[in-house]
Amino acid sequence: MAIVNMKELLINAQQENYCIGAFSIANMEMIMGALKAAEETRSPIILQIAEVRLKYSPLSLIAPMMIEGARHAEVPVAVHLDHGESLDTIEEALTLGFTSVMYDGSHLPIEENIKNTKKVIAMAKKYGAAVEGEIGIIGKKEDGSGDGESLITRVEDAKKFYDETGVDALAIAIGNAHGVYTSAPNLNFTRLKEISTSIKVPLVLHGGSGITEEGFKESIEYGIKKINVATATFNSVVKSVDKLFKSSNTVDYFTYHNNVIEAAYENIKKHIKIFGSYNKA
Ligand code: 13P
């Protein structure tokens, strides 16, 4: 077991009808928590970081930790750049050894999105890496900013985008949003079914935090094969650390360190179980 291409994980998930969790991390402790959860549950996972987060966790530092962690894992782990915005950052991630990258051109006119995604696919091919594209507008940006307005993916756009690019995974908008949902998410399963019956690409659901267990299960049943979870893990860590510091006046550094690992581990393990990738390694 080792670092793997994301495409491989998604094809297996497609054949056996389960879903791979793509867990966003920000530091070494969260990477350790994610790997612990994956190994304990014998689950393949995707470790990811979004370009917008690299101002906090520089790619040159976080990438080697993600890659070495994946390489030494007892289960298959793909290392993914989430919401790549610039071709330079995408190329840097590929050079450092990421096995998958997302190009997010969802805000662009479809022709431009297709053109840029094709450039990324050509680039990733040189490194043997997989590519995720996006079509439709997911409410709020990856860091939770933005007005939350979403634009449900149209079937004909998804089909055109996939036919012309041949991406390995396709993120769609079905009423999902990044960050904390301001009201209960209302996922458009009818549209999801229409898209998944018209194209055979593994579909990706962003904005996993705040979706209910039933919502996840229904999404997976109708074709979602990768679900991104970020905010729920970050919030679990903050909540747990807050509780730790409130419980004592003298918290030593390494108690705090272990607390971060455990909080990330617990949240990721919970999602792995819901996603059905348990024991699929
Ligand atoms: P959440 O922060 O809502 O879990 O979204 C994660 C995500 O989709 C990252 O791309």
Image (cartoon, rainbow, N blue to C red):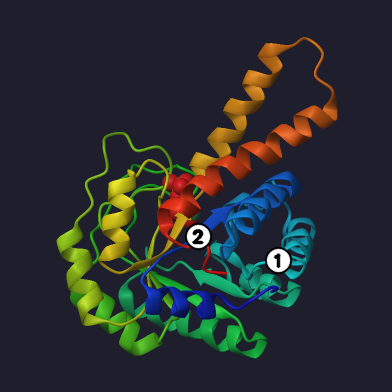
Residue 276 percent location from the top left of the image:
42, 60
Q: Is mark 2 within 8 Å of ligand 1?
A: no
- Residue underneath mark 1: 74
Distance, label 1 to label 2, CA atoms, is 14 Å
- The three-letter code of the residue at mark 1 reads Glu
Q: Is residue 198 left or right of residue 252?
A: left
Res 278 label: 2
Q: Are marks 1 and 2 in contact (CB under 8 Å)?
A: no
Q: Count up the numbered dots.
A: 2
Could you classify mark 2 by the number of other residues whose Cα lies within 10 Å: few (under 14), some (14-19), or many (20 or more)? Answer: many
Dot 1 or dot 2, earlier in sequence: 1
Could you classify mark 1 by the number of other residues whose Cα lies within 10 Å: few (under 14), some (14-19), or many (20 or more)? Answer: many
At horizontal 55% and vertical 89% (from top left) the residue drawn is 122
Q: Residue furthest left?
A: 190
Q: Is residue 27 left or right of residue 280?
A: right
At horizontal 75% and vertical 35% (from top left) the residue drawn is 258
Q: Residue furthest front?
A: 279
- Between residue 187 and residue 160, name the one nearer to us: 187
Q: Is mark 1 within 8 Å of ligand 1?
A: no
> Is residue 55 visible in the rendered structure shown here?
no
**Above or below for 22 versus 117:** above
Residue 197: quarter of image: bottom left
Q: Quadrant of the C terminus?
A: bottom right
Residue 235 percent location from the top left of the image:
54, 34
- The three-letter code of the residue at mark 2 reads Tyr
**Above or below for 85 versus 55:** below
